[in-house]
Image (spheres, rainbow, N blue to C red):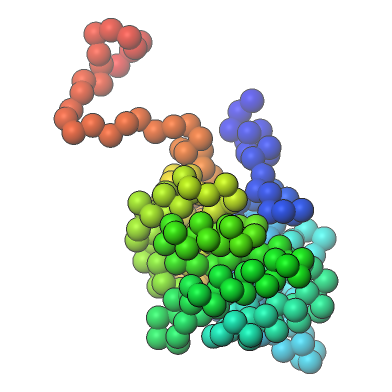
Amino acid sequence: MDASDARCEDRLELGDFVLRSRLIVGTGKYPDFETMRLAHEASGADCVTVAVRRVDFSAGETVLDHIDRTKMTLLPNTAGCYDKEAALRTARMAREMLDTPLLKLEVIADEKTLLPDPIATLEATEVLVKEGFTVLAYTSDDPILARHLEEAGATSVMPLGSAIGSGLGVLNPHNIALIKETLSVPVIVDAGVGTASDVAIAFELGVDGVLLNTGIAAADDPVLMARAMRAGAHAGRDAFLAGRMPKRPFATPSSPRKGRVGG
């Protein structure tokens, strides 16, 4: 089996939902709908997240008109919610309007940092799981909080790489790796991914998926960047599955006298 065949079998399972791609993309900040559509196609993603509170459903044309739901799994999110009750209302509205229990839960603490509110996120997760939602919980890179979210019934825990829209990449790889090592549910890095190497680094840590938006949408050429992100995802995932060589404090000869052929 070659790498492309292995990738076809390497799917991301989120409850009852199965994704062919481990890259999830967003819909915000694009210059126009056509660029968004082409970038989605170039990314290879088959799941796209939509900020329900920011869609004007009364408008004649919305972002939903440019997403082919026969090919794309829709992942509504509660972006823009700053307390538990707002997140719960938005989640219920999303399920009613979009006919899906799948949900990316965001409860943001404040407008300056846009960091997740840990207590409100945990409490909202508990409520929504009891109501039958498939909750993907956006959180900080705190391994203990991640464990509590899993215990609350989250289908996936989504630690941030860095602040939303910052493009700073994965700032705390040790904690991300620890979260992945500790949890049994899928771990998806969400937020802060700025370029293809950030995606590769995240996957090399062993995470199950990466969600990004601004890194593609804010690029000078979003379609080309989407293609780069796809390649980064493949490279990082393949590198993780291959098993990297151990890091050593000192040099070792690349052509040893015994045990390996060639040099």
In the image, what residue occupies the spot 71% across and 63% down? 134
On the picture, is 89 further left or further right than 243? right
| Visible residue check, residue 93 | yes
Quarter in which the C terminus is drawn: top left
In x, y percent, where is residue 151? 59, 57
- Where is residue 112, by image quadrant? bottom left
Residue 80: where, in percent of width, then height? 57, 84
Q: Quick one: which residue is furthest to the left in this view?
A: 250
Q: Does residue 230 appear in the picture of this structure?
A: no
Residue found at the very far bottom of the displayed protein = 58
Quarter of the picture containing the N terminus is: top right
> At x 74% / y 61%, what residue is drawn?
72
Q: Which residue occupies 46% across, 38% down?
A: 239
Residue at 61 percent across and 28 percent down: it is 2
Note whether 225 is above or below 123 in the view shown.
above
Q: Is residue 183 above or below residue 35?
A: above
Q: Nearer the viewer, residue 170 or 106?
A: 106
Left or right of 17, for residue 196: left
- In the displayed structure, 242 sits above or below 75; it is above
Q: Position of residue 29 (x, y in %)?
A: 55, 79
Classify residue 31 as left or right of residue 163.
Answer: right
Q: Quarter of the image holding residue 75?
A: bottom right
Report the front residue among 194 and 185. Answer: 185
Q: Where is residue 67? Give x, y as percent.
A: 74, 69
